[in-house]
Amino acid sequence: MKLLLFKRDGICYNLVNDFSDMLADELNKLGWETAFFDITPYGTGCPAPEVLNGIINRGFDAAFAINAVGQQDYSIDGLNIYEKMGIPFFHYIIDHPIEHQVSLRSELPNYYVLCIDPDHVEYVKKYFPNVKDAFFLPHGGFGSLDNFSEEEYMSREYDIMFSGSHYPLSNYENEIRQYPPAIQKLVITHIEYMTEHRDMKVEDGLKNVLSDMGITDLAPLDFRNYAIATAMTYKYMKSYFREEIIRYIMESDLPLHIFGSGWEELSGEGSGKTVLHQPVPFNRVNELFKKTRIALNVMPLFKSGSHERVPNAMLNGTAVLSDHSAYLDNELGDLIGFYDLKEPWNVANTAFELMSDWHRVYLMTEKAYSYAKENLTWKSRAKDIASYISESLKTAGA
C-alpha cells in the first residue's frame, strides 16, 4: 500500500507535521510505503503542473491529510489531482468539525473523514452527505522512559504544568461585535447558554437556542448553515473554559507552569505562583512532560472524545488532571484524575488532594504509563488507520 501524506510548516506548533511523521514511521513498520507532499512553498497558490504531475505519476493508493492540510483544490485541466488519480482521500480532523465546515464540503468523490470524538463522527455523517464514511480515531501519543521510578518521578521540576496557547476572550468579543445584528444576537445567546449547560455538546446547545427562538424542525443542511454562522461560539467557549480553569488554579496559589502564547494578560497581581514560559514546538512537548508530575488538561468541548495532551502525558510518566469526557471516563477511568467542569472552582481542591499524597499519584501514573504503552501510541493508531483505509478500498472495489 502506498500512501500520500502532507506537510505544511507553522501549523499549531508544527503539530500537523509531527503527527504525520509519527504516522508515517509506524505505517512503514507495517510494510506500507509513505511519501510526503510538502505544500509549504505554495502558500495559497497552486503548484506548477509539472509538480502536480510528479505527484500523480507516483502511483499512490490513497491520500491522508490532517486538518485539511493537502486538501487544497490542486487541479490539472479542471480536474482535482486526487480525483484524477482515482484514489480515496482521508481527512483526519483533530478539532471539532465546526471549525472545518468549508473543507468538509469537499466535492471529491471518495472522501472519508476520521474524527477524535464519536459525536463528531455523528455530526459529519448527519450534516455532510458528501462524505462517503466517517470513523472514530482517538489521538495517539508519543514518548518513552528509560528510567521510570518513584524516585525519578518525585525529582521532577514542575508540580503542575499546562501546555497550550490562549486567545483572549476580548478579541473574540470584538469580532462578534462586527457581526450583523441577528447573527450577533444568536451567537451571544448561544454562548450564554453554553456557559450554563457545560456538559452539553455545542451543536445540541445551538438546537436548544434555536428552539427557544421558535426555529424548529430544521433540515440537516439548514441546521448546518446556522452552525456555520455560530462557529464563533465553539472558539469562544474553548478559550472561556481554558481561561476559567487556569484562573482558578492561579488564584489558589498552586505552583503552575504554563508553556504557551497569549497568557500575558493573566499574569501580574493575582497570578499566585504561576510561571509563564515561551511555547515549545510540539515535538518537544514530551521533554516538558518528563519534567512534570501533573499535567493539567482542559477538554476543548470534546464531550465524548480525547485530546493529544492526555496520551502524551501518560506515555511520559506524567499524571493527568482533566475534566470529563465519555472516552476518558470509559477508557481511562482510574488511570487519570478528574475535576468537574460544572464546578470549576473545585479544580484547585482536586489538585491539592492529589498533591497531598504523591505516592498514590505515582502508583496511578505507573499504571497509566503501562496502559498507554500498549494502547495509546501512534503504533496503535497506525494499525487503526491502515485497517480503515484497507477496508474502504476493498468496499470501493467490491
Image (spheres, helix red, strand yellow):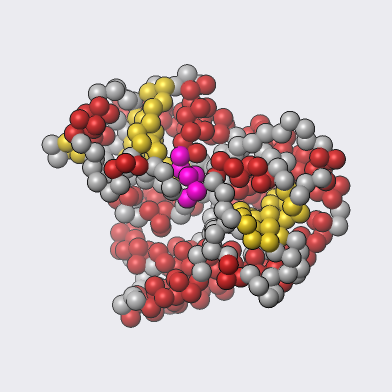
Q: Is residue 134 visible?
A: no
- The vertical placement of 31 against 67, above or below, is above
Q: Residue 213 or 154: which is nearer the viewer?
A: 154
Q: Residue at x 32, y 41 (%)?
A: 41
| Left or right: 182 in relation to 339 | left
- In the displayed structure, 54 sits above or below 329; it is above
Q: Residue at x 30, y 59 (%)?
A: 221
Residue 116: x and y, percent?
50, 46
The x, y position of residue 201, in whole percent, is 51, 61
Number of callouts: 0
Residue 381 vs residue 157: left or right?
A: left
What residue is rendered at 57% in x and 49% in y? Answer: 280
Query: Residue sitting at 66 percent across and 72 percent down?
Result: 268
Locate the C terminus and report the quarter of the image it occupies: top left
Displayed quadrant of residue 271: bottom right
Front one among 289 and 210? 289
The segment highlighted magenta reads 12-17
Q: Position of residue 193 (x, y in %)?
A: 51, 74
| Rendered image quadrant of residue 223 | bottom left
Q: Is residue 23 magenta?
A: no
- Asked whether 392 or 344 is in front, the reply is 344
Given the current orientation, which residue lies at the most extreme top position?
31
The x, y position of residue 182, in whole percent, is 33, 79
Quadrant where the N terminus is found in the figure = top left
Q: Does residue 72 appear anywhere in the picture?
A: yes
**Figure check: 304 above or below 224:** above
